[in-house]
Amino acid sequence: DGGITQSPKYLFRKEGQNVTLSCEQNLNHDAMYWYRQDPGQGLRLIYYSQIVNDFQKGDIAEGYSVSREKKESFPLTVTSAQKNPTAFYLCASSRINGDTEAFFGQGTRLTVV
Amino acid sequence: AQSVTQPDIHITVSEGASLELRCNYSYGATPYLFWYVQSPGQGLQLLLKYFSGDTLVQGIKGFEAEFKRSQSSFNLRKPSVHWSDAAEYFCAVVPGGYNKLIFGAGTRLAVHP
């Protein structure tokens, strides 16, 4: 079945450690996105990529990094510079034209202790 | 500032009652418009979308939405709510000329038996 897979579903890390969240899609979509979700704030865009080896910052990119070495994969690294990393992270993908919907993974809940 | 506004943070309705969730946007050109639904701890599922044409669009699970250009609105409606509709609902737009999805803060729907 085609879709987007995020792993792991739950992740615990100690403060000061970098952590990488995985996102893989087999929908042959060019565009991929990372969102952060906090209660009452909706989804805020962290990074997005429209083509391999290229990506753009979203609204809250500070403290995060991404790579897009393969069309299918768009991993997100939460670095120690991110001041409040505990959140629910959602990955999405879509075709390149704006008139198509985005498909979402099931999310990764990151807790930093 | 450009934004997507969902004025109602929480809404509670009785099962069988009608529902309307509000969404307004403040982008100059008519954007592409979407409604997504999210169950707790899950990813987002597309309910419906508007790109052009008929301003009343039908979606899954008995939902519909109406685009009103003069009001910059895209309100979601359902004539009779079921207990399984309890979830969080997000309005989203792809602004004209862009290829990124911008979300409202969400409306959490509770359904009383």
Image (cartoon, helix red, strand yellow):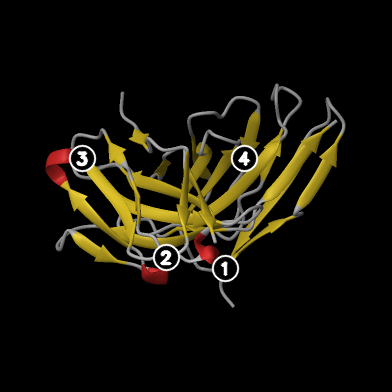
Which residue is under mark 2? B16
Which residue is under mark 4? A66
Give me the chain letter of mark 3: B
Which residue is under mark 1? A3
From the top left corner, tell me how far across and down residue B25 is, in percent: 28, 37
| Residue type pointed to by label 4 | Val
Q: Does the CB distance between marks 2 and 4 fall below 8 Å?
A: no
**Callout in the foreground (2, 4):** 2
Q: Is residue B52 left or right of residue A26?
A: left
* SS at circle 1: loop
Answer yes or no: are tags 3 and 4 on the same subunit: no
**Callout in the foreground (2, 1):** 2
- Residue sitting at 19 percent across and 44 percent down? B30
- Tag 2: Cα neighbours inside 10 Å, few (<14), some, or many (≥20)? some
Q: Nearer the viewer, residue B66 or A61?
A: B66
**Separation of disc 3 and disc 4 at Cα?**
34 Å
**Disc nearer the start of the sequence (3/2):** 2
Q: Residue A105, relative to residue B105: is it above or below?
A: below
- Tag 4: Cα neighbours inside 10 Å, few (<14), some, or many (≥20)? many
Q: Quadrant of residue B28?
A: top left
**Disc nearer the start of the sequence (4/1):** 1
Q: Is residue B77 left or right of residue A43?
A: left
| Residue type pointed to by label 2 | Gly
From the top left corner, tell me how far across and down residue A32 is, in percent: 51, 51
**Callout in the foreground (1, 3):** 3
| Residue type pointed to by label 3 | Ser
| Residue type pointed to by label 1 | Gly
* SS at circle 2: loop
- Residue sitting at 64 percent across and 44 percent down? A89
